[in-house]
Amino acid sequence: MSKKANILIFDSGVGGLSVYKEIAKRFPQLDYLYLFDNEAYPYGELDRDILISRVDALVGYFVEQYQIDLVVIACNTASTIVLPTLRSHLSIPVVGVVPAIKPASSLANKAIGLIATPATVTREYTHELIRDFAQNKPVEMLGSTRLVDMAEEKLRGHPINHVELKRILSSINNKIDVAVLGCTHFPLIKEEIQSVLGQQVLLVDSGEAIARRVGELLNMESQSESVGQRVIYASAPPWEERALNKALNELGFSSIQKCPLVI
Ligand code: DGL
């Protein structure tokens, strides 16, 4: 691709920023538009038909209005159900993020922990991934919206409560040697999760693999000479907007703009 690509990164909240960071680290020269559907957050508790129609409408609108070249659905909860619909409506590449069960299974000796949203752990897509790629290793599943909230809070400057985190992770703690961070919010609280599970547990997420896939699809090498534009839109006024904007500005984004499409 000769012209500078414009990438749309989509999530329900700030989790997709963990994927953005991996992509932008390799390809800082691209233009990034980040859209989060906080109006319907958390996706992990949203009705699946509503989720599909919201993502389809929002992403379709942005692709048309902002000349997007490639879409990254930086949300496991959405990717496990919306990709076929999006791909049937869009003529540009759509990259999804799904739990990294396959790489985790080659790294695990004992058991794999899948930490995700309540929806992701029940999805047929996730169960198929486990059937096809877990190589008969036991998979302990943990679905938690509170963990997603904690990542949202951290980005707004609130410290993570270690005791609460330990209680949430207690059902998988000491049972696994590899943990899949199956929600894009969780790399944002990776150190805290690691400190509860212990250094012997390997944490795996899909961020790097997604960045590689974007490079393949755009036929691009890693480059660091120039920096493109970073713009961010939300579907509703975010809570603690000022604190959030501070964190976003540090990542190179302009302050949050209101998504023009109301659904
Ligand atoms: N970041 C999202 C994911 O990867 C979803 C969080 C939510 O809205 O529940 O699953």
Image (spheres, rainbow, N blue to C red):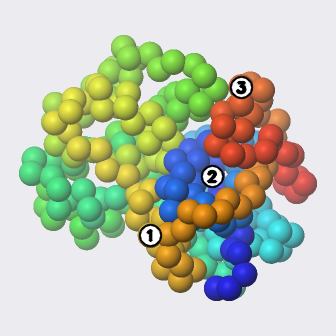
| Mark 3, residue position | 243
| Residue 101 visible in rendering | yes
Asked if ligand 1 lies within 8 A of label 3, the reply is: no
Three-letter code, disc 2: Asp
Q: Percent x, y for residue 145? A: 51, 34
- Number of residues whose C-alpha sits closer than 10 Å to that of mark 1, classed few (under 14), some (14–19) or many (20 or more): some
Dot 2: element: strand
- Residue 38: give x, y in percent of width and height: 71, 42
Is 190 on the left or on the right of 195, as rendered? right
**Residue reaching furthest left?**
109
Name the image quarter holding residue 168. Answer: top left
Q: Would you identify the image quadrant in which residue 167 lies?
A: top left
Q: Front-most of 260 and 66?
A: 66
Q: Earlier in the sequence, mark 1 or mark 3?
A: 1
- Residue contact at pointers 3 and 2, CB within 8 angstroms: no
Q: Is residue 3 left or right of residue 25?
A: right
Q: Which residue is mark 1?
A: 212
Looking at the rendered image, the quarter that the N terminus falls into is bottom right
Residue at image coords 76%, 49%: 232
Please say if the residues under marks 1 and 3 sit with CB atoms less than 8 Å apart.
no
Q: Residue under circle 2? A: 11
